[in-house]
Image: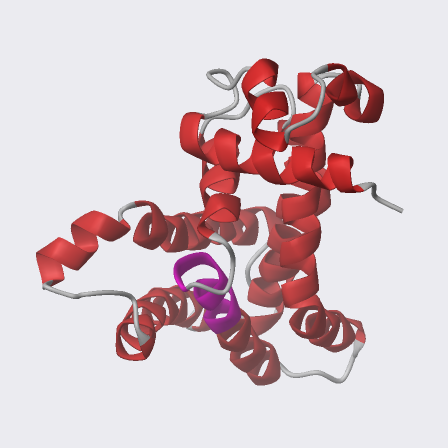
Amino acid sequence: MVKESQKRLLDMAKHLFALNGYQATATRDIAEAAKVNISAITYYFGGKLGLYRAVLQNIAERVQQELSEKTATVQNLLADENATAEEAENLLYKLISELCSLVCSQRLPSEDIAVFLHEYFVPGEAFDTLYQELISPVYTLAAALIVKATGNLLDHESATLYTIQLFAEMFVFRSRKQFILQQLNWNEYGEKEMTKITDVVICHTRAVLNLYKKV
């Protein structure tokens, strides 16, 4: 059972890591914000790096929970020898819609997204935690769906490269949100805006699939 002081440390650490980044955040500031003795960080987490890993683990678990229903459906389809390429393609688009909603909408706390994107684009010592717990499992499923959607005409390595490009596109819509809102005169990413963003990502993915379907 997580103690209250431990939870406060996690919450305050996530807030400060999102605000300042890992390197610029001092353990003293985290402890003060959490209203605990600085030694509690070492006691609970073994130090600053351990605390940061715990924050990344927490984010990974939250995202996995949000995706659990969709990833279970993907796993079932991939295990079904009778599943068709068309079924895989339709499920891929549903997964993309779910991911766009998670990355760009308000479903996840902005602090979670900020910490994730910083570690994703500027990997540090704790990147392996994020990679093993979240990035690799989700990317692997998406790549497998792409392979299946092309009728196995695309090899896994190429599908993985397209998957990386696919996620990068979604991340751009989040990391460059303020610019996009100003450029398009949008107030926020509401339902209408999210539909347009998702349609763009799906359209680009469909173009890739159609290219290999014609081989």
Colouring: secondary structure
Q: Is residue 72 left or right of residue 188?
A: right
- The image shows residue 48 at horizontal and vertical percentages of 67, 18
Q: Is residue 22 above or below residue 183?
A: above
Residue 158 sits inside the magenta stretch? no
Residue located farthest toward the right when viewing the structure as drawn:
1
The residue shown at (54%, 54%) is: 159
Q: Name which quarter of the figure residue 35 lies in.
A: top right
Looking at the rendering, the stretch of residues picked out in magenta corresponds to: 96-105
The residue shown at (50%, 65%) is: 107
The residue shown at (26%, 72%) is: 193
Q: Is residue 39 above or below residue 16?
A: above
Q: Name which quarter of the figure residue 188 lies in.
A: bottom left
Q: Name which quarter of the figure residue 10 lies in.
A: top right
- The image shows residue 180 at horizontal and vertical percentages of 19, 55
Seen from the viewer's position, the closer of residues 33 and 177 is 33
- Name the dominant secondary structure of the magenta segment: helix
Q: Is residue 14 left or right of residue 177?
A: right
Residue 101 sits inside the magenta stretch? yes
Q: Is residue 21 left or right of residue 75?
A: left
Seen from the viewer's position, the closer of residues 14 and 149 is 14
- The image shows residue 112 at horizontal and vertical percentages of 53, 46
Tell me, yes or no, if residue 131 can be seen here.
no
Q: Is residue 19 left or right of residue 52?
A: left
Tell me, yes or no, if residue 157 can be seen here.
yes
Instruction: Count all numbered tags in the image, as a single digit.
Output: 0
- The image shows residue 76 at horizontal and vertical percentages of 77, 76
Seen from the viewer's position, the closer of residues 124 and 23 is 23
> Is the C terminus in the top left, top right, bottom left or bottom right quadrant?
bottom left
Residue located farthest toward the front when viewing the structure as drawn:
35
